[in-house]
């Protein structure tokens, strides 16, 4: 869409609680960009599920669960391949990357960047194909480069996020396998961020705003977030994460907190198995936490937070429970549209705009 808006048709979505029960203009699911994203997501989700089965992660260690998950992964893989083929995308690039990753991890004695190469190659292929779909083949090279750096960041963030659990369980982790400490891993991430920004700058785009927000600011904040989980680790430099219902690090009104300020650990440690504890490659989702600030009541147990979250969504953030750090903020400080949308001042009138 950023490359060629005309090739990305929109439609009107129905009311949603996270938008204060308002409709919204969204990309049509039948658009080529959305279908490519779906194909890649299915292929990577299938690969990630198989990885969980091999590692016997949690419930995947049970035979019946593993068998069912394996069948589900096969269906996802087939659906992703069909969708990708209809768009001219070769799914074998992703499949071969997954196979190569397993072989590299079995070899041992390799450098960290040698281990991230399959992920880089897979993501580069997906990024580059968007230029083909947008009718801008001159963007293929720059998008491939951006995809390589994005894939490297995804792999490294996943490794850092899973580090302690992998160490405790004796599961393979590229940082442990290569003897890479957190300071060095942070340097690799910063180098990849720099390369990603340079690649983005070379792109021919009709609209840079969303690309810059997602592939620059939010990824930088994700790097800060994952390293900030380790007290005494490398300091953050990209600022706190986003503070609303949209974006890679969602904020939630009842105490989970991935978007905490850089350099400070979260109040409630979150492992890879918890919501928001995953990565771009198919782990836990990006749903994070609305931190309750210092001195605020702790988030109560289920089901109270569910009801509170629903009310927060229906009021566009104007209602905040007592454990939310936004509870004492002004109207504009609580409202998601005003705080994050940068599209209107919802609190200036009773007629909220279509943020």
Image (tube, helix red, strand yellow):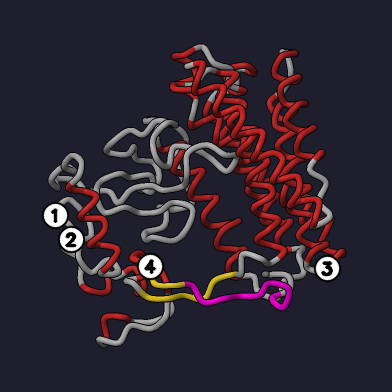
Residue name at image x 26 percent, y 55 percent: 309
Of labels 3 and 2, earlier in sequence is: 3
Q: Is residue 334 visible?
A: no
Question: Disc 3 and disc 2: Cα gap in Å?
Answer: 47 Å
Q: Earlier in the sequence, mark 4 or mark 2?
A: 4
> What residue is rendered at 79% in x and 54% in y?
128
Mark sitting earlier along the chain (4/1): 4
| Comes first in the chain, label 3 or label 1 | 3
Residue 142 within the segment the image draws in magenta: no
Mark 4 near mark 2, Cβ–Cβ under 8 Å?
no
The 10 Å Cα crowd at callout 3, few under 14, some 14 to 19, many 20 or more, is some
Q: Residue tagged by mark 1? A: 322
Q: Quick one: 129 or 182, which is closer to the camera? A: 129
Q: CA distance from mark 3 to mark 1?
A: 50 Å
Q: Residues within 10 Å of mark 2 (few under 14, many from 20)?
A: some
Which residue is tagged 2?
327
Using the image, determine if residue 301 lies above or below residue 335.
Answer: above
Where residue 333 appears, x then y in whole percent?
A: 27, 69
Regarding mark 1 in the picture, which secondary structure is present there? loop
Residue 136: which disc? 3
Percent across and percent down for residue 289 are 33, 48
| Residue 156, position as x, y percentages in the image | 59, 34
Looking at the image, the residue that sits furthest to the right is 138
Mark nearest the camera among 4 and 2 is: 4
Q: Residues within 10 Å of mark 1 (few under 14, many from 20)?
A: some
The residues bearing labels 4 and 1 have C-alpha atoms spaced at a distance of 24 Å
Above/below status of 231 relative to 335: above
Name the residue tied to disc 4. 16
**SS label for mark 4:** strand
CA gap, disc 1 and disc 2: 6 Å
Quadrant for residue 324, please give it: bottom left
């Amino acid at each position: 869409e950023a490359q060629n808006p005309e090739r990305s048709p929109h439609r009107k979505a129905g009311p949603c609680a996270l938008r204060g029960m308002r409709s919204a203009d969204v990309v049509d699911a039948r658009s080529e960009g959305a279908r490519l994203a779906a194909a890649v997501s299915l292929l990577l989700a299938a690969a990630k599920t198989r990885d969980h089965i091999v590692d016997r992660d949690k419930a995947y260690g049970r035979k019946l669960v593993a068998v069912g998950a394996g069948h589900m992964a096969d269906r996802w893989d087939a659906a992703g391949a069909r969708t990708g083929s209809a768009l001219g995308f070769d799914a074998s690039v992703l499949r071969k990357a997954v196979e190569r990753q397993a072989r590299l991890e079995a070899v041992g004695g390799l450098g960290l960047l040698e281990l991230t190469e399959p992920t880089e190659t897979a993501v580069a292929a997906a990024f580059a194909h968007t230029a083909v779909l947008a009718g801008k083949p001159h963007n293929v090279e720059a998008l491939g480069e951006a995809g390589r750096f994005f894939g490297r960041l995804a792999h490294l963030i996943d490794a850092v996020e899973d580090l302690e659990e992998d160490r405790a369980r004796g599961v393979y982790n590229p940082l442990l396998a290569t003897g890479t400490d957190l300071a060095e891993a942070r340097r690799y991430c910063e180098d990849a961020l720099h390369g990603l920004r340079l690649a983005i700058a070379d792109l021919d785009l009709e609209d840079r705003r969303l690309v810059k927000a997602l592939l620059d600011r939010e990824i930088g904040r994700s790097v800060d977030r994952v390293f900030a989980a380790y007290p005494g680790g490398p300091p953050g430099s990209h600022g706190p994460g986003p503070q609303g219902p949209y974006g890679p690090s969602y904020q939630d009104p009842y105490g989970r907190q991935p978007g905490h300020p850089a350099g400070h650990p979260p109040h409630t440690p979150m492992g890879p198995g918890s919501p928001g504890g995953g990565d771009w490659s198919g782990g836990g989702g990006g749903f994070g936490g609305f931190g309750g600030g210092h001195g605020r009541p702790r988030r109560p147990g289920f089901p109270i937070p569910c009801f509170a979250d629903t009310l927060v969504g229906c009021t566009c953030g104007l209602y905040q429970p007592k454990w939310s750090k936004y509870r004492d903020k002004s109207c504009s400080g609580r409202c998601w549209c005003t705080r994050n949308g940068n599209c209107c001042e919802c609190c200036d009138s009773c007629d909220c705009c279509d943020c």
